[in-house]
Image: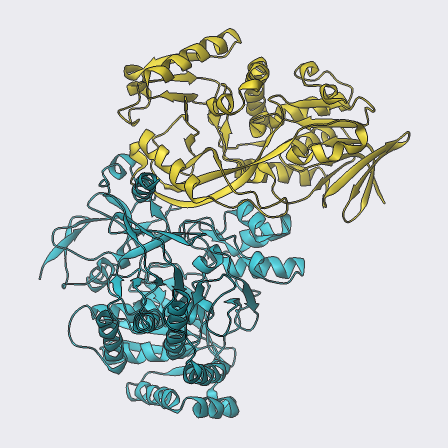
Amino acid sequence: MPDFSFDGRPVPYRTGQSLAAALTEAGIRVFRQTAKGAERGIFCGMGVCQDCLVTVNAVPNLRACMTKAAEGLEVLTQVAFADLRLAAAAPATAQARILEPEVLVIGGGAGGLSAAIAARRSGASVVVLDERRVAGGQYYKQSVEGAPLDVQQSEGAELMAEAQASGAEILGAVEIWGAFDGPLFLAEHEGAALIARPRTVIVATGAYERPCIVPGWTLPGVMTTGAAQTLWRSYRTLPGRRVAVCGSGPLNMQVALELAEGGARVAMVAEAAASPLAHPWAGLRMALAGPVLAAKGLTMLRGLRRHGVPVRNATVLTAVTRTKNGLLAAFRTAKGRQTSVEVDALCMNDGFEPQNEILRLLGADMEYDAAFGHLRCVRMEQCETSVPGLFAVGDCAGPGGAPAARTEGRIAGQAAAARAGHGDAHDLHADQRELRRHRRFQKWLWRLHSVAPRSLADTPPETILCRCEEITLGQVREGVRTTPGHVGTLKRATRVGMGRCQGRYCGSVSARLVAEATGGVIDDRSHFAPRVPVKPVSIAAILAAQETLDGLD
Amino acid sequence: MASTDILVVGGGIVGQVAAIELAEAGARVTIVDAASNAGSTANAGSLHVQMQSRFMRLYPDQVPKLEASLPFYQAAAEEWVALDAAHGPFELVRNGGLMLAESPDQLAFLEAKAGREARKGLSVEMLDRTGLERIAPWLGPQILGAELCRDEGKLNPLTVNNRLRTRVSALDIRCVTDRIGRIDHAGSGVTARGVSADYRADRVIVAAAWGAGDLMGPHDLTIPTRAEPLHMNITEAGGEQIRHLIQHAERSITLKQLGSGQVVIGGGWPARDRGRDAVPGVEMMSVLGNVALAARLAPSIGGLRILRTWAGMNTVIDGASVIGSLPATDRIMMALPGDAGYTLGPLVARMVAAMMLGRTPPHDPVQFAPSRFAA
């Protein structure tokens, strides 16, 4: 096996593996030190949390989950303050590439690929930009080597092949950081700059996972369920030998089963919601709306039983602590009793947060969904937002699942192409009927789970709320008390949400804490103001974009 | 109607410091703040003393006033040191400021400027490339030289705002969120009329920055306060390297590294005004232009990432501050720093507070009298 070095020690990897996967497989969990001396490792596994930073060949602060392992790389534990003399060694960037498609699709998952195919079929020129190296998105997450694991992966592979055959240009490893009126997008692509000036835009950026915010949730070894799934499905790497899964929702069951089938010992699946037997009506309605998916759910439960994985309903995570050999995850059970398991990796998914930064930046209207505790993008029949020519499909507009995202993609793809002068997008009735059925299924599915944002009333004040700036819940509560009014004021007073992930985990919680204190309603303006960059962007990439745009004048 | 000894309109750096001074002297003080678009909450933390080339270029007619204000800027920097000692630490560092030249013309401009500033008593010095190598070896190779102004420095406005707010709260200064639209005075006192309520006071300090001009209607004064939305950027943290406040002889930029290790890049690139109730928007050309310029001057930051951009309101008047009583009544006092409002803020605040208490102000206010705007 080829290898790279981590702090001087050789780490073997398989072709295509991310640094994070190879390090995890080698049993290395600590990737970086924070400014306050804490240790961090892989958490979200999808480029959102910005916690798995490492230095690679003297370039500091690269995300290990988004960086491909390669022979001879010198990888170092990331220190909190990168030496600027090392940073200066960053390579100069080439001239920026300019893309001017009729339809730009942002995000290459279920919704984005479907939109690209539909827009191409209508005759529009299409470019798809995806943050990951390999498109497919979080639902279809593709394997970097070997045959598809199951139907879900092969379905994704088919969709990818269809998108490629459609003639759409699909670019991976593209980090969009700027969205401006026009519309005009600025992105970083393998160290170079990319500028997109499309006629119409379909945003299909999906969702990221909501964590269980408890003491110890920042410890290395604690990761989102999706991160564990990516390790396994994309890189055939188990997050640990002993695993527990917690939070709420169907992804937790699925990943627990996948990991058990992959050879992990899954000590427990803790589901916050009561047993589905307590909601027979919702279960029945869900099964009527989506018999195939409902059957898949039952198969999952049977599979877990076969592997001896206990599924505990009405059980929630209360704390994570370090032990000599791993992590101790403590839970409160339905009867109020404490129980705990020792694991190597603890996976958490407490629902989803839409990745709506680009939509908000461009001024698309949002509505607060109190049942789920997040913003939903307001859309018209054909998935167009309040901004003409800007469409939103899939979970970025408010989580609705991959099948709905595919249907929305087909609708928006045709509509965006029509807007660019191709076809008329009149024949969408069948898709719209199907979409209604998917939404019915989702509505009943989530009644079986616990999707409302968790109350933090019983959370200890020393619990970290803002991972990046290491700000505790107690500090934020004190900030709410002394600087009432707005989440922006709270941010400036406490630094909550000021870090590298830009408030993606603490933002909605902070908005709710402020609203609780002021008694105000929550809306788009209750959240941190959307600002560029959408994701941290290298100064070198800004320099390249500036030189290119300067040359255009 | 609530009544108070002294009402301070505006809760930014000026309003807070003035309120603290007055409350410490025993006055009952209320601060009314509109809680939107205050310059102090968006400030980037430069401590300016030498004449800013940006300002000289944009407002050449105001240069004489600016030059006459130089000792005032110097005193303002000293005032920050005192404020830091009393209410800090604010991460205040005074390593000096470098204004960079990339061409012989720019060098000549700086030499002339340094001469004028030295005559006004500033501690300035011209450095050639060799001199720069000793104190800032990370500068781009095209930099020919620089003017070093030893009085300049940097601080963290977030820390300042927090610490002053704590002091305000400890002194039981009442803080109200409201927007004052008009201030009337009668023989017995002053009434400030807000959107939510009216506020009665014996006297009023107007520390409302760009919003102050609109309050002068009934007082036969036309103070040309103007909001200037400006753009800023901040990077991820890096190891300590950049000790000085960096500016340029011809182009708009300020660049500094804060105690957090983050580099703040600003210096007057425009942002989009979206009205007084919405924060200004970020313009693409400002992000690109401002950051690209910074990367050319300091290539060592090229490997860092920009984490965030934002925009805030600077206040422009006529190149000089407006300090003191209105011609018609000494119940209303203006406390408006000219350009570089954050730097001048504490000194302006303490001058007005002293005048209100009948004490000798720490700097002669005569050149800043509001009467210069009388009809």
Against B335, residue B161 (above or below) is: below
Residue A211 in view: no
**Between B329 and B6, the one nearer to me in the picture:** B329
Decide if residue A106 is on the left or right side of residue B358.
left
User: What percent of the width, then of the height, locates residue A299?
Assistant: 33, 89
The residue sitting at 49% across, 82% down in the picture is: A443
**Between B4 and A191, the one nearer to me in the picture:** A191
Colour scheme of the picture: by chain
Q: Quadrant of the N terminus of chain A?
A: bottom left
Farthest residue, direction top: B119
Colour chain B appears in: yellow
Against B173, residue A419 (above or below) is: below
The residue sitting at 32% across, 23% down in the picture is: B136
Farthest residue, direction left: A1
| Label total for image | 0
Farthest residue, direction right: B187
User: What percent of the width, then of the height, locates residue A344?
Assistant: 29, 67
Which quadrant would residue B347 be assigned to in this image? top right
Residue A83 in view: yes
The residue sitting at 39% across, 37% down in the picture is: B289
User: What percent of the width, then of the height, locates residue A124?
Assistant: 32, 67
Colour chain A appears in: cyan
Which quadrant would residue A321 be assigned to in this image? bottom left
User: What percent of the width, then of the height, locates residue B27?
Assistant: 78, 31
Against A395, residue B104 (above or below) is: above
Q: Quadrant of the C terminus of chain A?
A: top left
Which quadrant would residue A409 be assigned to in this image? bottom left
**Between B199 and A40, the one nearer to me in the picture:** B199
